[in-house]
Amino acid sequence: MTSRPFQQVDVFTATPYLGNPLAVVLDGSGLSTEQMLAFTHWTNLSEATFLLPPENPQADYRVRIFSPGRELPFAGHPTLGSCHAWLAAGGRPRGAHVVQECGIGLVRIQRDAASGRLAFAAPPLRKGGPLPEADVELIARGLGIARDDVAAHAWCDNGPNWRGVLLRSAEQVLALKPDAAVLAGLDVGVVGPRGKVGVAGPHAAGGDCAFEVRAFFPGNNGMVEDPVTGSLNAALAQWLIGAGLAPERYVAAQGTALGRAGRVHVAREGGETWIGGHAVTCIAGEVRL
């Protein structure tokens, strides 16, 4: 074992412990996939990342992203959290953007000097369009709502295979009591070991946030709710803005039901969707791996 620089970062919040935590090993060189998976499981967090030298000459660094039990080609809060940790450790981008290399390819990340937020350019959707009606009915039953409460729905697959449903109000979203037995049983192309359900609902006009978002997916011990989810918000934004269901700039709240206060800043600029938020380091030191 060797000592490696380490940070635990809270993402999509400027206030420590109100966002989504991420473990970042800043030097993953020489570690096997099995070692990365074992450490990720040990952290008891939703994700851990390992930074490596880039293989693509256009990238500033390469990242491998893990959740307990598997590697992810892309995830939003690990992207922003890894970039924050890399910059905090002295990383310097070669160009105007930080360029991250990960399983889906290259992801550009911009820094807003005025606000201090980071934002990534959302990768294109791998799959869009409406969900099968049978899926919608099962998701509604698993969420404990009537089918008519689902105002709209779509595939939101940008690496993680999200299924997005839009409810009629933020209050409905916050009142959800998902049935883990129903949702966990959807293991035939619906909500299985890699299936995920994302739910959004509009807030009343005039507030700071336009939507309330919740994310549910199967974990090692049943259904898991994610505090704040960059990949889901990226896919929701591309769907909702493209369908005329959301403005080109808005802020989404997530984590409220878990006692968090995540804020995701969405902007559609020049044909690209940018997903941004603050990040703050909560733990810095070394880890033996």
Image: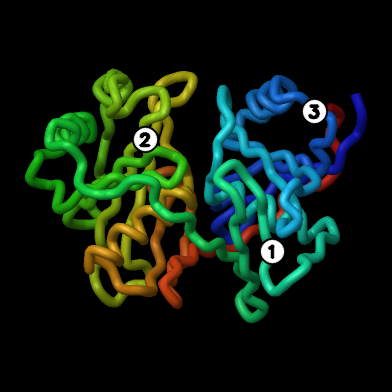
SS assignment at label 2: strand
Q: Nearer the viewer, residue 240 or 104?
A: 104
Tell me the SS state at disc 3: loop
Quarter residue 209 falls in:
bottom left
- Of the two numbered discs 2 and 3 in the rendering, the one whose residue sits closer to the viewer: 3
Between marks 1 and 2, how big is the CA–CA gap? 29 Å
Q: Which residue is mark 2?
A: 196
For residue 97, above or below residue 160: below
Asked whether the viewer can see residue 203, the reply is no
| Amino acid type of the residue tagged 2 in the rendering | Lys
Q: Residue furthest bottom?
A: 114
Number of the front mark, 1 or 2? 1
Q: Amino acid at mark 1?
A: Val
Q: Are marks 3 and 1 in contact (CB under 8 Å)?
A: no
Q: Quadrant of residue 50?
A: top right
Q: Residue at x 32, y 38 (%)?
A: 197
Secondary element at tag 1: strand
Q: Is residue 164 above or below residue 97?
A: above
Classify residue 152 as left or right of residue 25: left
* Of residues 231 and 181, the one drawn nearer to the viewer in this rendering: 231
| Residue that mark 3 sits on | 31
Could you tell me if the residues under marks 2 and 3 are in contact, i.e. CB atoms within 8 Å? no
Residue furthest to the left in view is 148
Q: Can I make out residue 106 in this image? A: yes
User: Which label was assigned to residue 98?
Assistant: 1
Query: Which residue is at the far right?
Result: 2
Instruction: Specify which label sits upstream in the sequence, 3 or 1.
Output: 3
Labels 2 and 3: the sequence-earlier one: 3
Disc 1 packing (10 Å; few <14; some 14–19; many ≥20):
many
Image quadrant occupied by the N terminus: top right
